Amino acid sequence: MSEDPLASATLARLYLEQGHLDRARGVIRAALERSPFDGRALVLAERLETLHRASLVLSSDGERLVARWHYVPRPRTAYMTIQWFDDRGEALGGHTLACETTGGEREFPWPSVAAAAAAAIRRCDGDRWIPVAVARAVARRDGAP
């Protein structure tokens, strides 16, 4: 059993907000050791696991955009949104689709003009949307033939 009287979800959240994920995980482990049914600590433990594991990567071979996701928690409540932008930053369109599995891959054709793509995965938790993963944007400088 943990002897750290300061271990709490509040302290772990402070570490998380400062970007100290390993410290936050250690504090949450200690807090849950002391009180395994602490609701705030359980929610934060899940959030920390998500931040550690989930990923979304965009890649392109010039003809198609490929989105790959890994370790998405609760995939049946998770959605990936891809948005295309032209070289002026104007939205060209996009797609939102259910992840359905913890990992997967989807291909999309590029718009017929020079464009950039951005993507994110979010999960519905009751009446809130929780960010799960954000991909680094990719661009295609030339339009389709």
Image (tube, helix red, strand yellow):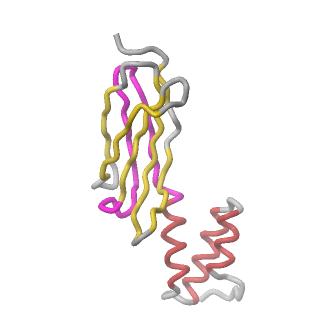
Q: Residue at x 35, y 20 (%)?
A: 63
Q: Is 140 rendered above or below residue 53?
A: above
Expressed as whole percent of the image width and height from the top left, the position of residue 19 reads 68, 59
Q: Residue at x 40, y 46 (%)?
A: 81
Q: Is 91 rendered above or below residue 141?
A: below
Q: Residue at x 70, y 85 (%)?
A: 4
Q: Dividing the image into 4 quarters, which one contains the N terminus?
A: bottom right
Q: Dividing the image into 4 quarters, which one contains the C terminus?
A: top left
Q: Residue at x 45, y 14 (%)?
A: 142
Expressed as whole percent of the image width and height from the top left, the position of residue 76 reads 30, 61
In the rendered structure, the answer to whether residue 35 lies left or right of residue 78 reads right
Q: Is 83 rendered above or below residue 9?
A: above
Q: Nearer the viewer, residue 96 or 22?
A: 96
Q: Nearer the viewer, residue 8 or 123?
A: 123
Expressed as whole percent of the image width and height from the top left, the position of residue 98 reads 30, 52
Expressed as whole percent of the image width and height from the top left, the position of residue 88 reads 55, 25
Q: Nearer the viewer, residue 9 or 53?
A: 9
Residue 65 sits inside the magenta stretch = yes
Residue 40 sits inside the magenta stretch = no
Answer with the quarter of the image where residue 41 lies.
bottom right
Which segment is the magenta one? 51-77
Q: Nearer the viewer, residue 62 or 81?
A: 81
Q: Across the whole image, how many numbered discs are drawn on residues?
A: 0
